[in-house]
């Protein structure tokens, strides 16, 4: 089992899991979609990534943090190619707290607070 370093607590307890989904709607395939769920077995940090590629090759990757809590933290990468996600391949990022689009610094502050809380819980 592949283990990654957790960005919240720093341990190598982050485990990625593939999520099976039905992509077909009414018998027509409208592109490709793949999902992975990441969870830390030490502090409980988790997020879901959903990569959607349409038939034209445009790609969107959505990262959903803080599932089950409010507000939901989402970050969306808009790309014109389904290549590997890097700073060079992302054309634009969109950030959301719940359903409201916010600036990157506000989103990062909320994510940092969440990770600080998770780190504090697992170290006490």
Image (cartoon, rainbow, N blue to C red):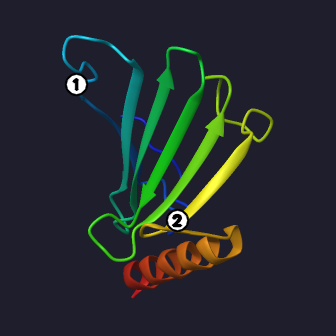
The secondary element bearing badge 1 is classed as loop
Q: Residues within 10 Å of mark 1 (few under 14, many from 20)?
A: few
Residue drawn at (64%, 77%) of the image:
106
Q: Which residue is mark 2?
A: 96
Residue drawn at (39%, 68%) of the image:
72
> In the image, residue 65 lies at what x, y percent?
43, 61
- Numbered disc total: 2
Rendered image quadrant of residue 39: bottom left
Q: Decide: is 84 above or below 68.
A: above
> In the image, residue 48 lies at what x, y percent?
39, 49
Side of 18 where 8 appears, left or right: right
Quadrant location of the N terminus? top left
Q: Residues within 10 Å of mark 2 (few under 14, many from 20)?
A: some
Pick the front one: 18 or 79: 79
Side of 83 where 1 appears, left or right: left
> In the image, residue 73 lies at what x, y percent?
46, 66
Q: Residue furthest right?
A: 88
């Amino acid at each position: 089992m592949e283990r990654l370093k957790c960005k919240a607590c720093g341990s190598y307890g982050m485990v990625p899991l593939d999520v099976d989904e039905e992509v077909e709607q009414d018998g027509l395939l409208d592109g490709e979609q793949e999902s992975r769920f990441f969870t830390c077995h030490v502090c409980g940090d988790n997020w879901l990534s959903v990569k959607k590629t349409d038939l034209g090759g445009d790609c969107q990757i959505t990262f959903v943090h803080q599932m089950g809590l409010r507000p939901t933290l989402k970050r969306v990468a808009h790309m014109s190619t389904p290549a590997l996600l890097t700073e060079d391949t992302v054309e634009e990022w969109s950030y959301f707290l719940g359903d409201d689009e916010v600036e990157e610094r506000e989103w990062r502050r909320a994510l940092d607070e969440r990770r600080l809380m998770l780190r504090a819980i697992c170290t006490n």
